[in-house]
Image (spheres, rainbow, N blue to C red):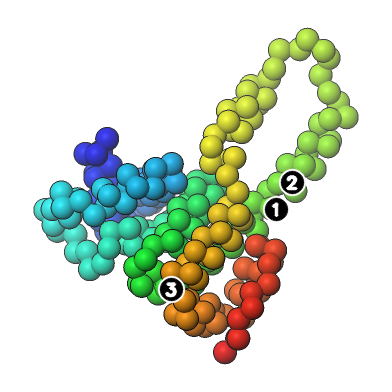
Amino acid sequence: MCCSTNKLIVGCLSGGDDHNPSKTSVKASSAAILARLLVMNTNSLAQLASDPSTSQLLQTASIPVQENILLCLVDIWVDKVDNVSSIQKKTIGLALSIILTSRLPQVLDKLDQILSVCTSVILGRNDDLTEEESSGDMSSSTSPDEGTIPSKEFRKRQIKFSDRINQLSLEDSVRENLQKCASIHGESFDAAMSSMHPSAFAQLEQALKITFNLSRR
């Protein structure tokens, strides 16, 4: 597990995929897997990211890392979120929300990007749910006869909703972890939030259904 995860980290942080769609797809999928690992076991991936063997592998692969590896992964998640599926987008959003609880002051430098992705995913999923509810209403009027064997689509939905990622609320996670971030970083957090673009700030409030008491600059 450790070795394979290390390889995923190295693959994500390696360059060379800018003009290669297949490499971009592989890197995006790897990034989504690492995001899931962080969501499912926060301490495990955090410890692995700080493990000397991971840094050694990156050096061996000639991959320069100037900051904490988890913060490097933030850049990858932000960059690749548009190249993954809806559920993977949510997974990346949840991983980014967890990063908000980091005590590293550098996390505030990425706060705008993290919140932008989370906002986009939340608002995008709300649109998806509205479409699903609409299609569900249409299909309910033509329900199958009793005793009909569940369709392949029904089984897929069962699997989908049994996934823990689907049971977690990205909205709640961002809201709670923003509060933790504020407690950890204090005035620096307020300054970072106040520097957000007004439209992005308004969308964040819309997504989280809250109003921040900050003095806007």
Tag 3, which secondary structure?
helix
Estimate the x, y position of residue 185 in percent, counting from the top left. 43, 73
Kind of residue at disc 2: Glu
> Which label belongs to residue 178?
none
> Which label belongs to residue 127?
1
Estimate the x, y position of residue 98 in percent, counting from the top left. 45, 56
| Residue 113 is at least partly visible in this image | no
Tag 2, which secondary structure?
helix
| Residue occupying image coordinates x 61% and y 33% | 161
Residue at which label 3 appears:
185
Estimate the x, y position of residue 148 in percent, counting from the top left. 76, 12
Q: Are marks 1 and 3 in contact (CB under 8 Å)?
A: no
Q: Are marks 1 and 2 in contact (CB under 8 Å)?
A: yes
| Residue occupying image coordinates x 27% and y 63% | 68
Kind of residue at disc 1: Asp
125 with respect to 56 (left or right)? right
Estimate the x, y position of residue 100 in percent, counting from the top left. 45, 63
| Residue occupying image coordinates x 49% and y 48% | 91
Q: Above or below — where is 166 with respect to 16? A: above
Residue at which label 2 appears:
131
The image quadrant where one finds the C terminus is bottom right
Q: Above or below — where is 198 with respect to 83? A: below
Discs 1/3, front? 3
- Rounded to the nearest whole Å, what is the CA distance between mark 2 and mark 3? 39 Å
Q: Which of pointers 2 and 3 lies earlier in the amino acid sequence?
A: 2
The furthest residue to the right: 141
Kind of residue at disc 3: His
| Residue 140 is at least partly visible in this image | yes
Q: Which of pointers 1 and 3 lies earlier in the amino acid sequence?
A: 1
194 with respect to 141 (left or right)? left
Q: Crowding at label 1, few (<14), some or many (≥20) Cα neighbours within 10 Å?
A: few
